[in-house]
Image: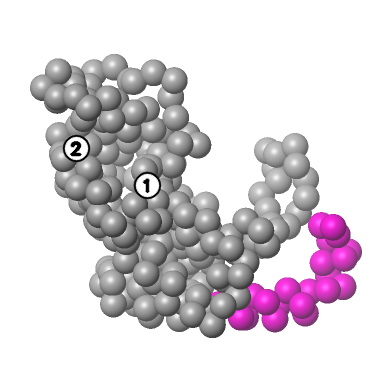
Amino acid sequence: MHNNRDWFQANKPRYDACRKRFEALTEEYIDGLTTIDPTLQGIAPKQCIWRIYRDVRFSADKRPYKEWFGTFPAGPMKDVPNSAGKHSMRGGYYLHLQPGQCMFAGGIWCPSPELLTALRREIVANYDEVEAIMQQPSWRKFFGDFDTEWMLKKVPADYDLTGIDEPHATQVAEWLKRKAYTFSTPLTDEQVCAPDFMQHLLTIAQAAKPMNDFLNYTFEEYNIKIEKQSR
C-alpha cells in the first residue's frame, strides 16, 4: 500500500526486524537442506536472500521495493567463484514468502540457450528416468509436472522422437516446449506460520532432490560455461 521511499525509510526498523527473522529462517533451512543435499554445505544465508530493492531501470513498474522475501539455497557452479545461492544457475530449493502467494520451487530457471539445448537433449535421451522421478508418490504429491509458465507453442526442431513409443513421445514433446525446467508447489499462509513449517518444507525439498539431481547432472555433464548472473 505504501511502496515509496519516504514511507519505507520511516518504517525501515520494521523491515530490518523482518529481514533478521528471515535470515534466521534461511539459516535453519540451509542446515536442514544439507542433510538432504550435501552440495549446500558452507552456504551462508546472505548468499541466498534477495535484496528488497527492485531494479526499475527497464521496467514500466517503478515501485522501488519488492513485496516478498525470497531465498534460493543452491550449490555453487564448478570453477565459478562466489556462485552459490542466488547466483547459481544450478537447480536449487527456492522459498518465496508473500502473503497469499507463498511457494516452494525447484529446478533450473532461465537457462542459457546452450544449457536449455543440453537439458532438452538429456530429457529425450533419458525420458524414462524423468518419468520414473515423476511417478514417485512424493513427487506426485507436491509437483506433478514441470511448470508451464514458460513454453513454446510448438516443439523445437532438431529433436528426433521417432524411436520413442506412445504415450511417451507425446509427453516428451510437451517437455521439449519448456523454456525453463522448474517445478513448484504453493504454500498456504497457515502452513508457513505453523510450528512444523520447517519440517514440511524439508519434506518438499526431499521430494524435489531427485529432479534437481537429474538437471544438475546435465549441467555438469555438458560442462556448460555460464557467466554468473545476479537474479
Q: Say what amino acid the circle numbered 1 marks.
A: Gly
Q: CA distance from mark 2 to mark 1?
A: 15 Å
Q: In the figure, 84 relative to 169: above or below?
A: below
Task: State which quadrant residue 158 falls in.
Answer: top left
Report x, y in % for residue 115: 30, 39
**Which residue occupies 50% across, 63% down?**
95
Name the side, left or right, on which 97 lies relative to 80. Answer: right
Residue pointed to by mark 2: 127
Q: Nearer the viewer, mark 2 or mark 1?
A: 1
Image quadrant occupied by the N terminus: bottom right
**Which residue occupies 42% across, 77% down?**
199
Say which element carries label 2.
Answer: helix
Q: Which residues are magenta?
A: 1-24
Report x, y in % for residue 34: 31, 75
Q: Residues within 10 Å of mark 2 (few under 14, many from 20)?
A: some
The colour scheme applied to this rendered structure is: one colour
Task: State which quadrant residue 121 falls in.
Answer: top left
Q: Residues within 10 Å of mark 1 (few under 14, many from 20)?
A: some
Residue pointed to by mark 1: 144
Main secondary structure of the magenta stretch:
helix
